[in-house]
Image (cartoon, helix red, strand yellow):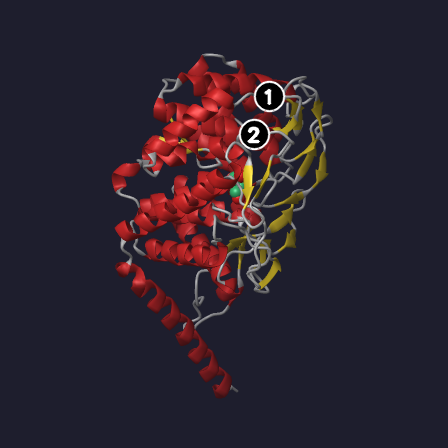
Amino acid sequence: MVNFRHFRTALCLISIVIAASQSFYAQSDKVDKKQMSVRVKAEFLHAWNGYKKYCWGHDDLKPISKTCRDWYGQTILMTPVDSLDSLYLLGFKKEGDETREYIAKNLNYDKDISVQVFEITIRELGGLLSAYQITGDKRLLALADDLGTRLLPAFDSPTGMPYRFVNLKTGKTNDPISNPAETGTLLIEFGTLSKLTGKPIYFEKAKKALVETYNRRSDIGLVGENIDVTSGKWTNTDSHLSGGIDSYYEYLLKAAILFDDKDCRTMWEDSIAKINTYLADEGPEMSKKNVQGKPIAADLWYGHADMNTGNRTATTTGALDAFFPAVLVLDGDLNRAKMLQDSMFKMWQANGIEPEVYNYKTGKTEEFGYPLRPEIVESTYYLYQYTKDPKYLAMGKQMFDDFVKYCRTDVAYAGLKSVKTKEKTDYMHSFVFAETFKYFYLLFAPEKTLDLNKVVFNTEAHPIQKTWKN
Ligand code: DMJ
């Protein structure tokens, strides 16, 4: 017999959820893009001035103690290099010119330090190349060429996949236990360096590293979380779209687009089919049906599975995974992109800001930190560009309001130790300038600011223009 009391309660809950989402999206029409872009610029400047006041010339600002961090004990100007193209894109030309001058005169890679190849490539090599394309300043290209040469010994492993660390002065490498993100997120930067310098070696080394990673996929076509670059054997077979794998997939597709590379296109097509087969998952809302037997809401997520069996290993996602709607948009799969973005926004709303790890089946947050990550903003920007649906402006505004409310400090922006308590950490990553503010700005900025069809963003949001013929 039907239990009418439960039925009534369920109907009531459904209407509350629908009403809440309708009232949220009803605000869509009210987002004033001009006003929002002015707000984003003002907050960028607030953080930039804090960095300049307390840490100019150092890698990063610690915004609570107002002290500085140099990643390797001596500066490689992480924040200035990572921020340079944003300064120009957001219209801070004077600041951009001053920073560029400082970089050209002071950045020196001839240092006896062992650096993380992936991070230095996406932040510094990507930043220098993008800023070179914007300004035409050849000193930036020379610095990129010098850095690229110093990073090349990293690829001298038996498989061609790079060691994680290389010494910029001696070329000595270390740490062979890597992951697909670190072995496969290099081709946009190294490939562009080849195209701009006429030296094919950069493209060849980075492409081989990407192909060698793909070649070690399992029989069902997935990659794992850790791989030994000396033996080529997987040391962790967990497969997912999160940290350690994420941008490997992003670069298969983006390198196919930027370089018209057929191998990358084939590897991407194969990979996305396997991702949608084994990693895609439904959340609880999909299994709840309305009176007509239809799912209450589309509820798409991507979880974890074992790379060999395809068996589900975890139903967790997180802030890093939120890059994937943007990739789906680029691939033309707007349907999945929209559904996944709605899911990711629910993850944001669960705590009023986005956690590092969230279990989409239980609705519980599993890792509470928020280091000011950009990925969900990036996906909002892509979706707005491709759909022009004002709902994404409303989403972006909500995120920006929360970001300012919880992460602003008197001198800059600080990550959160916990999205639950909103307690802050004493750190502001350079990607806040390179990515988070940039994607917020581009979401609301005038259309002419940047044509998404004419650039490919590296994974650190440095726009690369295809200025060469294949
Ligand atoms: C950035 O350095 C890049 O976006 C990278 O691909 C992933 N992590 C951070 C931002 O969260």
State which tag comes first along the sequence, 2 or 1. 2
Residues tagged 2 and 1 counted as in contact (Cβ below 8 A): yes
Please tell me whether mark 1 sits on a helix, a strand or a loop: helix
> Tag 1: residue type?
Leu
Give the quarter of the image for residue 162. top right
Residue 195 visible, this angle: no
Q: In the displayed image of the protein, which residue is found farthest to the top?
A: 198
Please tell me whether mark 2 sits on a helix, a strand or a loop: helix
Q: In the displayed image of the protein, which residue is found farthest to the front?
A: 53
Horizontally, residue 96 falls left or right of residue 205, namely left
Write down the residue under mark 1: 151
Residue 128 visible, this angle: yes
Residue in view at x 54 percent, y 47 percent:
63
Pick the residue in front: 308 or 162.
162
Binning the other alpha carbons within 10 Å of mark 1 as few (below 14), some (14 to 19) or many (20 upward) gives many
Horizontally, residue 362 falls left or right of residue 378, namely right
Write down the residue under mark 2: 120
Position of 333 relative to 167 (above/below):
below
